[in-house]
Image: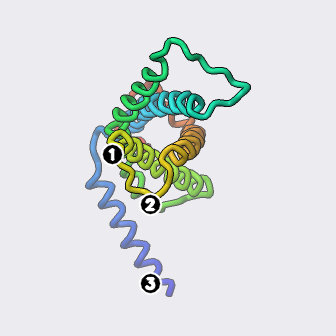
Amino acid sequence: MGGYTQRLSTVLERGAAGARQALDAPERTPRTAVVLGRIVGIGFAVCFLTGVFSHLHQHPIAWLPLPTRPVELYAWTQGLHVAVGTALLPLVLAKLWVVYPRLFAWPPVRSFADVIERASVAVLVSTALLQLLMGTLNTFQWYPWPFSFTRTHWALAWVLAGAIVVHVGVKLPLIVRHWRHTTTPEEPT
């Protein structure tokens, strides 16, 4: 049984190395990931804040008065929400393209911190893509699901915000290192 496990591990390791080599591109650097992450993070923050503003106007809280002037303020914030959300689609895909080879790291997990990081990234990516897909379909007023769009979009916004905070916390040393400096392609993301 031990020989079989070793052979399987060797085959998987070679496959992962081949996938990493095939996916290698000079643009896939930690610096590129940090720059795209900044832009995507700002975009999601704008969408989150405008979404909270919209939600509080639709479901007011008695003790929290919201501005009602200028009259167009709500329309402006919703326009910003939709425009930034739409712009996030290609940006999120670009960010995923830059970090995609990390899926083929070998061994897949090296420590408990790696398990937490991969789990948090899975939540982050799936929630971000679902939010963008749902928001896009909402602009067409097409709802191919049986649940309430607004309640689900609202709840997922909080999950996404938490996932972003966890992701930034986990990646903070890398972010700080590459915030303003250029990097070499062989540095891990």
State yes or no: discs 1 and 2 in contact (Cβ < 8 Å).
no
Q: Is residue 55 left or right of residue 99?
A: right
C-alpha separation, residue under disc 1 versus residue under disc 3: 34 Å
Residue 4's mark? 3
The spot of residue 169 in percent (x, y) is 60, 39
State yes or no: discs 1 and 3 in contact (Cβ < 8 Å).
no
Q: Is residue 62 left or right of residue 6?
A: right
Describe the element under mark 1 as helix, strand or loop: helix
Give whichever of 70, 137 is nearer the camera.
70
Q: Residue at x 39, y 66 (%)?
A: 13
**Which numbered disc, 1 or 2, marks the residue closer to the eye?**
1
**Image vertical order of residue 72 relative to residue 59, above or below:** above
Residue 122's mark? none
- Sort mark 2 into few (<14), some (14-19) or many (20+) by Cα contacts within 10 Å: some
When asked about the image quadrant of residue 76, the answer is top left
C-alpha separation, residue under disc 1 versus residue under disc 2: 19 Å
C-alpha separation, residue under disc 2 versus residue under disc 3: 18 Å
The mark that comes first in sequence, 1 or 3, is 3
Q: Is residue 12 left or right of residue 42?
A: left
**Residue topped by disc 1:** 97
The spot of residue 124 in percent (x, y) is 50, 47
The mark that comes first in sequence, 2 or 3, is 3
Q: Residue at x 40, y 37 (%)?
A: 33
Q: Residue furthest right?
A: 63
**Residue topped by disc 2:** 106
The spot of residue 23 in percent (x, y) is 28, 52
**Which numbered disc, 1 or 3, marks the residue closer to the eye?**
1
Describe the element under mark 3 as helix, strand or loop: helix
